[in-house]
Image: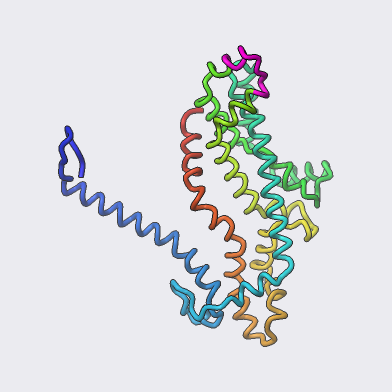
Amino acid sequence: MRKKNGHPVSDSFPDKVFNVTITIITFIFIILCAYPLIYVVSASFSDPMDIFAGKVWLLPSSPTLKGYKTVLDYPDVWIGYGNSVFYTVFGTLINVFMTVLAAYPLSRKDLKYRKPIIMLFTFTMLFNAGMIPNYLLVRDLHLLNTRWALLIPGAISVYNMIIVRTFFMSNIPDELLESARLDGCSDFRFLLNIVLPLSGAVIAVITLYYAVGHWNQYFNAVLYLTDKNTYPLQVFLRNILLENSINDLSAGSVANESERTYLNELLKYSLIVVASAPLLAVYPFIQKYFVKGVMIGAVKG
């Protein structure tokens, strides 16, 4: 019910129809987005024969932990988990550090040649050398088959840098810098003690963006890495799901070929849940920061 001049006014019939329609569409959209996730989780806890028989719809059928036990007994999964945690933690630290160092000077109006520098950054968003030149560059830098190949080439995202620069320009007033200078504060100390504490929201936003990107990355790992001990979890997941190496997991669990086929189907769902669980568990608590990040980038350039 709307209000006019402080008095409640009933919605007209077209308004009610519109509200009901939007509610129904939103509800349908939520179901379309949520059901695949619910189905994957339910299937991962279900008996593999019930999955083949199509008995799994919303809740697990004949609940079992056999899929998870088989997956967690596979050593490559733990190698991938450890590597993904390493890349996510250290990669995100490098990303945030480099992004802030680039964004803060570009937010300062007294920086010489600020606009040409920004244009150079923006140019990289429009044009890319391509996969082969990037591979040759990584090779010539002697980064191939090292962990640095996943950390250094993507050390900064121009899009995230622009978000942080926009936040600094919009929320850190010039008068604050002038007052700090009168007290003998250096630029580095101003950034460290004043700007960063006031920029917790945007720092959280880009940290989440970078962390999600590192956790989900697999293409650069496939391109630059050949040592299995350096693979992130997503590469192992890709190999298992797309290259039929899932038989390696089930080979020691069952001897019968038909049972192995059923178990392989169950393992696919279990692997997806194992690889997605950290993000699925954290996302409900960080969703508001993603929304805030979009709004920050939309304020002004």
What x and y, as percent, mark residue 74? Answer: 71, 70
Q: Which residue is painted at 48% across and 39% down in the image? A: 292
Residue lying furthest bottom: 256
Question: Which residue is at the front of the view, 32 or 169?
Answer: 169
Give the left or right position of residue 84, taking residue 294 as reference.
right
Work out whether residue 23 can be spotted: yes
Q: Main structural element of the magenta stretch: helix, strand or loop? A: helix
Q: Which residue is painted at 61% across and 77% down in the image? A: 66
Q: Which residues are magenta?
A: 178-189
Q: Does residue 185 show up magenta in the picture?
A: yes
What x and y, as percent, mark residue 269? Answer: 57, 69
Q: Does residue 111 show up magenta in the picture?
A: no
Q: Quadrant of residue 59?
A: bottom left
The image shows residue 298, relative to residue 285, as above or below, that is above
Question: Which residue is at the front of the view, 197 or 238?
Answer: 197
Q: Which residue is painted at 30% across and 57% down in the image? A: 24
Total count of labels: 0
What x and y, as percent, mark residue 19? Answer: 26, 50
Q: Quadrant of the N terminus?
A: top left
What x and y, as percent, mark residue 46? Answer: 53, 77
Work out whether residue 119 can be spotted: no
The image shows residue 16, relative to residue 236, as above or below, that is above
